[in-house]
Image: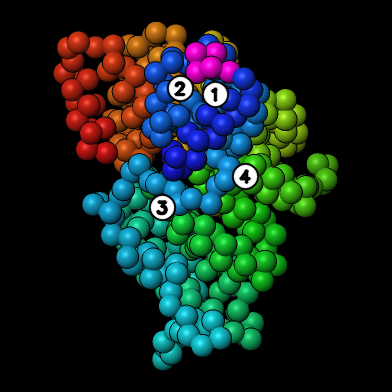
Amino acid sequence: MPDSTVPGDRLREIRLLRGLTQEDLAERSGLSLPTVKKIEQGGSARIETYHALARGLRIRTSQLFEPGDQPSRRDHADDDRIDLLPMRKAVAPALGPGGHLHVETVEIEPDLDQLRATARALDEAYHRDDYVTTSRLLPPLIRSAHTAVAHFDGGPQHVDALRLRSDALQQAGRLLTQIRVYDLAQMALRDAMRDSAAAGDVLAEAAAVDLQGWALVRQARLDEAEGVALATAEAIEPRLSRASRDELAVWGRLLVRASGAAARNNRPAEARDILHVARAAGSALGQRTGGAGYKSGAFNQLSAAYQAIENHMIADRPDRVLGMSERIAAADASTSNTRHRHLLDVARAHVALRQDGDAEDILDALHEESPDWLRHQQMASEVFADLLRKRKRLTGRQRRLAQFFAAA
């Protein structure tokens, strides 16, 4: 979460301008008085709590984080599991005079086919939630891509080398966002966009913008996330009758990203309107899936429905979450990340409705299926913490989950 000093000060300032007491704000937001007091005194909170406060104050959530020029604090450090120095050296290498990247001259011409095969293998490792392997092998791939771009400069294979480097940097940005190393993630995605633009690959550039939106949302930079996703979606909007699957998918992904940002920013009407357009992309796809070859991820006709469920949870409507989730098979999600994220929303809804056993079943299943993914999900640890508050004595399964989240 962002540095809590800014939202605490802003919360008190706006509350006083509204003529509200702390008790008034707690009642209007559906929160406890101690929670309001804690945040105003500089304590941290989850984004959903800030959203509830913004709803009570009738402001955008992002207004609680203005001014936003203070450095963010990461609540989760991965330095104990993942050595980030090689990644930093690959993504943010030292530059020489004129801002030029220094790469070693190679005697053997870079093999782009082999490098692309390595990139595909790392993409598969990421989707297996094998973040340690991915983080170890991405830096040498990126360094090789730097070498290839320099080696083929001015030649017929230069565009292919740029596309390869953009792919590798997008993989890095995606991984770094997942493990919450946002500064480095945005460097990687910025350079990936530049490479895609230089290669004339509009969809790859848009996919990198979508990944950037994910990083921005996780930093509560909601206005920026919505704005850049919408602007890019407008720039690449396809003709539905002629669009390819990938064009529809990348466009739809951007709209879903913008809707989620708007929902978190206490703009429910805008979130609904954007999602209505995203459904058009899904309808045009029909039973097909598109975008699997782009790092923003696959998209299908259910992608907008999953975002609608998430938006309902953001708006504190757990009954709608469970009602809609019963009509959608989680196994039909376009990506494993979408499916897992959806299940966490369902778990949160169960907790909100005091259906603790159902929520615990979901967490336990995710722990068994995707522990490496789960350990990086702050929402999961928060849901489990809510469950533990109601317990005086832990079961064996609860102790196992408690040990897992403590280690994570």
Which residue is at a point 72% across and 33% down the rendered structure image? 274
On screen, residue 52 versus residue 82, left or right, reads right
Q: Which label sits in the foreground, 1 or 2?
A: 2
Q: What is the C-alpha distance between the residues marked 1 and 4?
A: 20 Å
Which residue is at a point 39% across and 46% down the rendered structure image? 73
Which residue corresponds to mark 2?
A: 36
Task: Identify the secondary structure beneath mark 4.
Answer: helix
Which residue corresponds to mark 4?
A: 225
Q: Inspect the image, locate mark 1, and give the three-letter code of the amino acid beneath it.
A: Leu
Q: Inspect the image, locate mark 3, and give the three-letter code of the amino acid beneath it.
A: Val
For marks 1 and 2, the one nearer the N-term is 2
Mark 3–mark 4 CB contact (< 8 Å): no
On screen, residue 369 versus residue 201, left or right, reads left
Q: Which label sits in the foreground, 2 or 3?
A: 2
Which residue is at a point 33% across and 29% down the rendered structure image? 381
Q: Inspect the image, locate mark 4, and give the three-letter code of the amino acid beneath it.
A: Ala
Task: Identify the secondary structure beneath mark 3.
Answer: loop
- The total number of labels drawn is 4
Is 380 situated above or below 94?
above
Tell me the crowding category of disc 4: few under 14, some 14 to 19, or many 20 or more residues within 10 angstroms, Cα based: many
Is 242 situated above or below 21?
below
Which residue corresponds to mark 3?
A: 181
Q: What is the C-alpha distance between the residues marked 2 and 3?
A: 29 Å
Q: Please state, as top left, top right, bottom left or bottom right, where the C terminus lies in the image.
A: top left
Mark 1–mark 2 CB contact (< 8 Å): yes
Residue 386: image quadrant is: top left
Over which residues does the magenta segment extend?
20-24
Q: Residue furthest top?
A: 354
Task: Identify the secondary structure beneath mark 1.
Answer: helix
Which residue corresponds to mark 1?
A: 53
Residue 288 appears in the picture as rendered: no
